[in-house]
Image: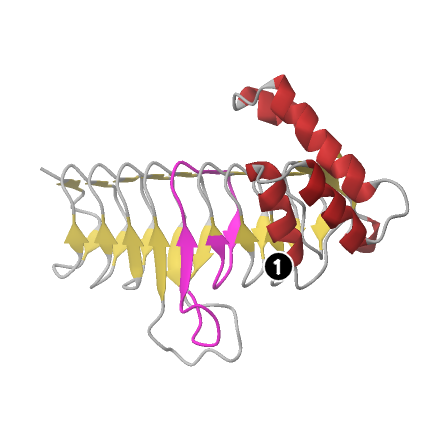
Amino acid sequence: MSKISNLALVSDKAKIGENVEIGPFCVVEEGAEIGDNTVLKNNVYVSSFVRIGKNNIIYPFCSIGTEPQDLKFKGEETFVYIGDNNIFREFITINRGTCDGRKKTVIGSNGFFMAYSHIAHDCMVGNNVIFANGATLAGHVDVGNFAIVGAFVGVHQFCRVGNYSFIGGYSAITRDTLPFLKTVGVRNGAKTYGVNSIGLRRLGFSEERIKKIERIYKILLRGKRKLEDAIRIIEETFPQDEDALYIIKFINNSKRSFIR
């Protein structure tokens, strides 16, 4: 049975799962959906256009599913979808999508979002991510699985953050950040600083796999090869390798170019 405070405003037309806890001064609008075992501590706002999965914990003063901060938005029906087992700390804001974009903002599962993080309209955030305090995504940003976005990082519209990448605090990211790498810096001064080896070891990557990724990036980023020549060498050296194929696909799909 769910536990809903008498001081919360929860619409009778919201869909509330089993064992949900909703604390005082929360607002859950008509049409919202909250999955089993999810906890809204207090003072949490959930709009009509939000679908939240199971086992999430949402701390005070979070605002989820508000209108996108986009002057073109005219009140269309768009959504926020959130997976399972996430932690959202205080004062987080998550905007729903736009009709000019994906019509939805999506957050995966098992994420840890620290206080004051912001996820703008039409973003796609993967699984097992960590957002440190004040991490901010502009609209249409993609964040891959197991990525870490450092404190007070700002990511420009339409950029992508690769799987297993690490962005150092206070960085301003205006191009794609390559998977598996550490990236730090401001705008055109941002640079890569090698493979995120500590993070990969913590996730159970073998030393052999880490060294292979280092070799791939040595071919790609060192020397004076043209990009197409580096990609050809990687394909020949690591045929059908899962990590190599992912890195090549990520680069080939880049629209804003990537940080070297």
185 or 164, which is in the foreground?
164
**Is residue 127 shown left or right of residue 144?**
left
Residue 132 appears in view: no
Tell me which residue sits at (40%, 69%) in the image: 103
Q: Which residue lies under the disc numbered 1?
A: 253
Packing grade of label 1 (10 A; few <14, some 14-19, many >=20) is few
Q: Residue 98 colored magenta?
A: yes
Q: Residue at x 56, y 41 (%)?
A: 163
Residue at 61% x, 51% y: name it: 250
Q: Is the magenta stretch mostly helix, strand or loop?
A: loop
| One can see residue 25 in this view | yes
Q: Where is residue 229 in the image (x, y as percent from the top left)?
A: 80, 51
Identify the magenta region: 97-124
Q: Does residue 77 lie above or below 40 as drawn?
A: below
Q: In which quarter of the image is residue 246?
A: top right
The image shows residue 135 at horizontal and vertical percentages of 59, 46
Which residue in the rendered view is the most extreme toward the right?
A: 224
The furthest residue to the left: 1
Above or below residue 191? Residue 188 is below
- Where's the N terminus, which quadrant? top left
Left or right? Give the position of 135 relative to 188.
left
Give the image location of residue 57, x and y in percent.
33, 37
Which amino acid does the dot numbered 1 rest on?
A: Asn
Q: Where does the image place residue 120, in percent across and percent down from the top left?
A: 51, 60
In front of the other: 221 or 84: 221
Residue 21 lies in quadrant: top left
Asked which colour scheme the image uses, the reply is secondary structure
Tell me the element at label 1. Answer: loop
Using the image as rendered, state which of residue 105 and residue 135 is in the foreground. Answer: 105
